[in-house]
């Protein structure tokens, strides 16, 4: 298993045994976030359809992001006795301070663009549920203000579920964990399959399928069980080529998956492949992909992945206000626009992550730098 450094013991009454840091997974967060950015923003009429699908079918990477969140949080925070390495309240406070300021600031960036598009009462209702982080529980409001902000509702549900799930699954055998993974995969696919069969005309049904937190929770829990399985060390480390092959197969699914499976593709169809990729990067023998994803630059960008994910839609909306209909542009101006936009998203996301962590996160946590014990999972 690749080890860069040991995770120091968690703060609390009892020090917990260290667990290897998994830098390749930190870097993977950044590349997953950038694929989601392309899914939401890349519109270019000059691209062949087969190439454009690499971005348009990136909904499966949203699923990877959610699985990765459950995996990393379990790896970082699960204690040997089955609970958390810190009190539940402290864990939830860490997660809230890590994500909430970023999400709310990015919502505010969109207010001048959309405030008057809502009715006089509706705009205040949307603002209230968005500030509370519960907008995704009412599908008509899920896309309020900054549309990726719905994921805060989902992540909060995952955070609340994690402590009891860790206690419940303590001591589970590898066989039982594999069965749980299979059951969670089925739970992902059943709602999406029902949608694909019925094909309701109202687009709110698709919005609910994609954003309703309980419908997406199995993806987070899939990551939790996968991390539990890795901790059990049930199998020998996979060879170094496993991760690149899994990534290549996942790339092929973006082009080859039939249109009829669009909803399932978005909601966990390829979760087993995502599991293989995470297993190979976390427990596999080191190879070139470990070196690229685990390099200092990738890890630093991975830390900013949630800020990048949150800021990309507001920045794109403001850019379109200035640039107009970029989807109709020809190759050179379109390519120049998107290269500049992607560079701005990364730069602004990193700056936002660093500034909010320094100004809000660390002071409110009130933990001396020398006592910070756990690596900070970004979007998890």
Image (cartoon, rainbow, N blue to C red):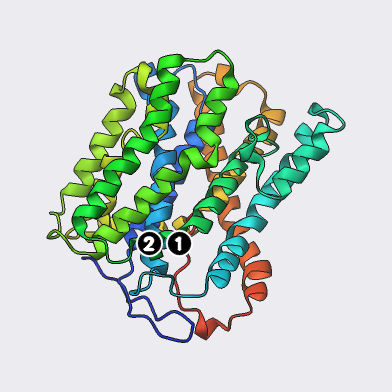
Query: Could you say which is closer to the camera, residue 287 or residue 106?
Result: 106
Mark 1, secondary structure of its residue: helix
Q: Are marks 2 and 1 in contact (CB under 8 Å)?
A: yes
- As drawn, which residue projects farthest toward the top? 201
Identify the residue at horizontal 25%, vertical 60% (top origin).
Answer: 230
Which mark, residue 352?
A: none
Residue 168 is marked as 2
Mark 2 to mark 1 CA distance (whole Å):
6 Å
Which residue is painted at 48% across and 34% down in the image? 38
- Could you say where residue 255 lies in the image, as x and y percent from the top left? 31, 24
Q: Crowding near pointer 1: few (<14 within 10 Å), some, many (20+)?
A: some
> Horizontally, is 268 left or right of 12 in the view?
left
* Badge 2 density bin: few <14, some 14–19, many ≥20, Cα 10 Å: few
Report the residue marked by disc 1.
Answer: 164
Tally the numbered discs. 2
Q: Is residue 287 left or right of residue 78?
A: left
Q: Nearer the viewer, residue 296 or 60?
A: 60
């Amino acid at each position: 298993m690749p080890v860069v450094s040991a995770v120091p013991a968690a703060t609390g009454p009892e020090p917990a045994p260290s667990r290897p840091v998994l830098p390749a997974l930190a870097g993977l967060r950044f590349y997953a976030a950038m694929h989601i950015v392309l899914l939401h923003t890349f519109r270019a009429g000059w691209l062949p359809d087969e190439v454009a699908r690499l971005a348009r079918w990136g909904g499966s990477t949203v699923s990877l992001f959610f699985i990765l969140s459950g995996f990393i949080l379990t790896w970082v925070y699960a204690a040997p006795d089955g609970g958390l390495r810190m009190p539940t309240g402290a864990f939830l406070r860490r997660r809230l301070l890590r994500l909430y300021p970023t999400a709310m600031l990015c919502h505010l960036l969109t207010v001048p663009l959309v405030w008057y598009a809502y009715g006089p009462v509706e705009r205040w209702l949307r603002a209230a549920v968005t500030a509370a982080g519960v907008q995704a529980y009412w599908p008509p409001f899920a896309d309020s203000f900054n549309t990726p902000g719905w994921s805060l509702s989902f992540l909060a549900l995952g955070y609340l579920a994690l402590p009891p799930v860790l206690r419940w699954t303590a001591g589970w055998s590898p066989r039982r964990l594999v069965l749980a993974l299979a059951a969670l995969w089925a739970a992902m696919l059943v709602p999406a399959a029902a949608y694909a069969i019925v094909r309701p005309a109202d687009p709110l049904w698709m919005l609910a399928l994609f954003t309703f937190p309980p419908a997406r929770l199995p993806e987070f829990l899939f990551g939790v069980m996968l991390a539990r399985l890795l901790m059990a060390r049930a199998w020998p480390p996979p060879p170094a080529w496993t991760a690149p092959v899994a990534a290549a197969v996942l790339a092929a699914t973006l082009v080859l998956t039939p249109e009829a499976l669009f909803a399932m593709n978005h909601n966990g169809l390829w979760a087993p492949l995502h599991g293989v990729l995470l297993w190979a990067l976390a427990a596999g023998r080191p190879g070139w992909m470990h070196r690229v994803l685990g390099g200092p630059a990738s890890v630093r960008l991975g830390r900013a992945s949630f800020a990048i994910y949150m800021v990309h839609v507001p920045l794109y909306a403001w850019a379109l206000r200035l640039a107009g209909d970029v989807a109709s542009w020809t190759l050179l101006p379109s390519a120049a626009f998107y290269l500049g936009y992607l560079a701005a998203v990364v730069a602004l996301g990193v700056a936002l992550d660093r500034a909010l962590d320094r100004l809000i996160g660390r002071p409110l946590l009130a933990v001396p730098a020398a006592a910070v014990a756990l690596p900070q999972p970004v979007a998890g």
